[in-house]
């Protein structure tokens, strides 16, 4: 119960704005009573962060494993994306809290959660490498960049996602999968190389564009 309340507060307010007194208040107890369960705020947040990673990792692995080893690579990638977004936006507060506060906690707290985070990232490397080996990803694609692009896009959804018609988690997952596997530009389109400028120009003053 304490961790559930703490995760919700961390997700809503952030790390610095959530105190032990805040956590104790929503739990219906005195601050001193928390010390019977946890030695410090850092111990509580470490548990929240580790639970958040475990939640999303277990959900992603479970959904992909349910497909079986013969599932098409595109199905596996879609299942992984769907599971990650579900854990972030629909399952509980732990994963969302993890995304929001990880960069704000003390270094020793981050260090205590790195092993589980690295294991989950390695799982994503394996999923994308399998898709590439089976011909589902265009040859020459930088899989590290693809992984970072996907995880960054999914994790940022915590900041902008608001449930509304046409913007369900399932719809977002389908869109991200299509973007990852098929791209957005017309096939064959090439970037035009612009000549390097040798002269510097005085920058124009910025003016707001008309609506």
Image: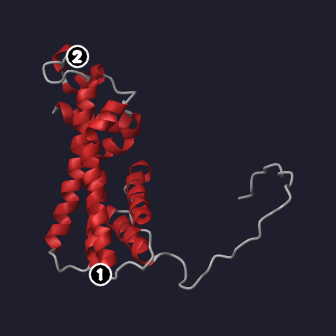
Residue designated by label 1: 134
Asked whether 127 or 91 is in front, the reply is 127
Q: Secondary structure at mark 2?
A: helix
Viewer-side residue, 119 vs 172: 119
Residue drawn at (19%, 65%) of the image: 63
Q: Nearer the viewer, mark 2 or mark 1?
A: 1
Contact? badges 2 and 1 (CB < 8 Å):
no
Residue drawn 28% across and 19% down?
21
Q: Is residue 127 left or right of residue 1?
A: right
- Residue 201's image quarter? bottom right
Q: Quadrant of residue 151?
A: bottom left
Residues at marks 2 and 1, CA–CA distance in whole angstroms: 55 Å
Q: Position of residue 69 (x, y in %)?
A: 16, 76
Q: Is residue 36 above or below residue 128?
A: above
Label drawn at residue 31? 2
- Tell me the residue at 20%/79% (across/down): 71
For label 1, the SS is loop
Quarter of the image that includes the N terminus: top left
């Amino acid at each position: 119960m304490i961790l559930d309340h703490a995760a919700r507060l961390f997700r809503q307010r952030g790390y610095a704005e959530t105190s032990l007194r805040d956590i104790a208040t929503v739990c219906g107890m005195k601050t001193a009573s928390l010390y019977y369960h946890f030695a410090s705020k850092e111990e509580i947040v470490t548990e929240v962060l580790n639970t958040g990673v475990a939640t999303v990792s277990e959900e992603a692995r479970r959904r992909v494993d349910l497909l079986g080893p013969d599932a098409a690579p595109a199905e596996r990638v879609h299942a992984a994306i769907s599971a990650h977004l579900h854990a972030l936006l629909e399952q509980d507060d732990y994963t969302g809290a993890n995304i929001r506060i990880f960069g704000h906690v003390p270094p020793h707290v981050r260090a205590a959660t790195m092993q589980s985070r690295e294991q989950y990232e390695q799982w994503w490397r394996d999923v994308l490498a399998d898709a590439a080996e089976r011909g589902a990803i265009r040859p020459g694609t930088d899989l590290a960049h693809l992984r970072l692009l996907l995880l960054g896009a999914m994790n940022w959804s915590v900041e902008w996602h608001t449930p509304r018609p046409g913007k369900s988690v399932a719809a977002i997952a389908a869109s991200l999968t299509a973007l990852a596997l098929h791209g957005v530009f017309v096939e064959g389109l090439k970037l035009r190389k612009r000549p390097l400028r040798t002269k510097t120009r005085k920058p124009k003053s910025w003016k707001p564009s008309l609506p």
